[in-house]
Image: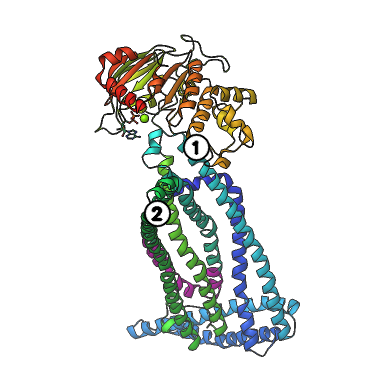
Amino acid sequence: MKNFLRALRHVWPYRGRFALSIFCAAVAAVLWGLNFTSIYPVLKLLNNKETPREWVDRSIKEVQIEIDKLEPQSQPLQDRLKELDKQQSREEVEHQKRDATNALAKVRRKLAGAGVVLWRYESARRYIYELAPIDRFQTLAWVLGILVVVVTVKCFFEFGQEALVGSVVNLTLFDLRNRFYRNVIHLDVDQFGDQGSSELTARFTNDMESLGAGVKMLLGKVVAEPLRALACVIGACIISWQLTLMFLILVPIAVFVLSKVGRLMKRATRRLLERMSSIYKILQESFQGIRVVKAFTMEPAERRRFKAATRDYYRKSMMVVKIDALADPIIELLGVAAVAGALLAGSYLVMYDETHLFGISWLRISEQPLDAEALLSLYIFLGAIADPVRKLSSVFTRIQSGSAAADRIFAYIDKQPRIRGNSDGPRIARPALNAPPVAGETAPFIEFRDVCFSYDPEQPVLTNVHLGVRAGETIALVGPNGCGKSTLLSLLPRFYDPNHGAILINGHDLRTVHIRSLRQQIGVVTQEVILFDDTIFNNIAYGRRKATQDEVEAAARQAFAHDFIMKMNNGYQTRVGELGRNISGGQKQRLSLARAILRNPSILILDEFTSACDAESEALIHQALKEFKVGRTTFLITHRLNTLEIADRIVVLEKGRIIAVGGHAELMRTCLLYQGMHDAQAQRLVA
Ligand SMILES: Nc1ncnc2c1ncn2[C@@H]1O[C@H](COP(=O)(O)OP(=O)(O)O)[C@@H](O)[C@H]1O
Ligand SMILES: [Mg+2]
């Protein structure tokens, strides 16, 4: 529940609207309650053959007669009491005295009650004579006319309330989504990794919806419905507060039952949301990998997997539906039982024309014997309470659903990135945007000092990596798959921090430097190119939003991408999404290189960046790179021998350790692993 309340805090900025919605709800509730007051006069008019004037006159007369009858009873009783006082106190006398006192009290109470009723009728009489039509039918028409008008006004306020609550909920979700996104986008790379992007997508969409539904229920119903119930309770109390009280014992029982049901609901919803996350995952995997799915004719298997997941989702959602549906009948049953109890008691009073229940003196229910119309009105008021109460019952469960969703959302909002921005740390000097960095001045020197790293404590990925890189040097990393090359380079932009040892840049520990200034120095081209659904222009200018057309074109030319871009329908303004599959891996890699070039980094990281290129474009890129790497500290990972020509030094990695460093000729002489790799490739080239 804690996280749900935290979500509610985002409602605070919109408290004005919310307050207004409560006002609307209150007005609507009062008008709703007023509706039912029309029943009494309608029944009266239909049942009796008298006009309102006749009715009020007769009623006054009846009460008057009753008073006249009661008044003479009190005098003899008083006299008798006085007489008894004079007698000697004996047990018998005491007994008689007590009886007389009781009888007198009863008469007086009846008199007082009748007085109140008389006063009510007399004030009503004034209005009836002034306002009410003389004819019965006309009066009925009047009452119904007023009813329609009241309902119209009520509907107007109800609309206002709904609309206001809706806007508050949606604005709250708007804030919450952005807050959520802001937190998530700043998390560390591995904090995305542990659950996958589909998991996050589910939380952003499905869970947000659930949370929104919960908040909406709370803001829309938790205030409005009790107000409506209250209006009815007040109406019922005016008729007989004692009978109403009998009915209201229902409330604590209902709250108890609902809180139990709510707890079940929360658990069921959490399972449901988790299941939906896994469905998102299946969708993402199978759609992204659609080529693999088709090539391996795995459609039936994927269908089965999806069906199994959705079947399970169906089961879990049925659980939620059942729990949700359970609340309703329980409340209804309780309500009917309570109304029946109150009605039974009331009927007793009507049938035997009594004011006391079962003749027991302390069970006085009303001042005057109830008439049937009043009892029916009471019944309708109590019945009407059932409606808001029933609506409240689903609120309970829905809020629990929202609470489960809030837990999942806030789990991410509470995550803190381990890698801090170091806004006070030393900054890495940045080259002027258009001039290449100068080795030793802006191009940094880097040192890996005894670096150890593992994703999983059991399995070390990098062990005691020692490597000094001069400013402006080009280092090639080679080694078998999975030996930790990509991992080593992902430590440079601080996607991860080493578990042991340190990486120094210009003599500063990476962990202390200003992280934005560091990342601004780094240009990355990865094997897997990420293009955004935007124009080619914007994709190249991704890291430098203010770049001009000329600058972007220059970068594209340098990456040998300009020509193929110009062949596209809209040139630089072609949207990547429109291209679909009409762009090859090699072309994508060249766009990615252009993006890195435009950023003018002083550290360049190229991870198997020509892997998808054909020989021709690879040669072009090599040429581009030879020019571009001048004055930049460059790291490249490659399996291709000709790329190694660009490197000043080659580092051979095996199982996370550096086993050799040197030039091509030297390594051919000294390093067996390198020899083996070289020979294998040479054979392939020949073949
Ligand atoms: N995000 C990750 N989480 C856990 N293990 C990883 C992750 N990325 C890579 N690994 C593991 O670390 C080892 C080195 O991977 P990597 O650096 O990608 O190798 P290379 O780039 O040399 O082929 C591999 O065994 C790989 O399974
Ligand atoms: Mg790799």
The answer to if 81 sits in the magenta stretch is no
Q: Residue furthest top?
A: 440
Seen at 61% across and 22% down, the residue is: 551
Q: Position of residue 222 (x, y in %)?
A: 51, 59
Q: Which residue is mark 1?
A: 182
According to the picture, the residue beneath numbered tag 2 turns out to be: 299
At x 40%, y 48%, the residue is 295
- Please name whichever residue, 30 or 78, is drawn nearer the observer in this view of the structure: 30
Question: Which image quadrant shows ligand 2?
Answer: top left
- In percent of the image, x 41 and y 84: which residue is there? 358
Q: Earlier in the sequence, mark 2 or mark 1?
A: 1
For the residue pair 306 and 315, the one nearer the viewer reads as 306
Answer whether residue 414 is visible to the viewer in this image: yes
The dot on residue 608 is none
Nearer to the camera, 476 or 319: 476
| Element on which disc 1 rests | helix
Q: Marks 1 and 2: in contact by CB < 8 Å?
A: no
Quadrant containing the C terminus in the rendered view: top left
Q: Is residue 664 left or right of residue 233?
A: left
Q: Is mark 1 within 8 Å of ligand 1?
A: no
Q: Which residues are magenta?
A: 232-260
Q: How many marks?
A: 2
- Residue 240 magenta-drawn? yes
Q: Position of residue 193 (x, y in %)?
A: 38, 38
Of the residues shown, which amino acid type is indicated by label 2? Glu
* Left or right of 273 on screen, residue 674: left
Pointer 1: residues within 10 angstroms few (<14), some, or many (20+)?
few
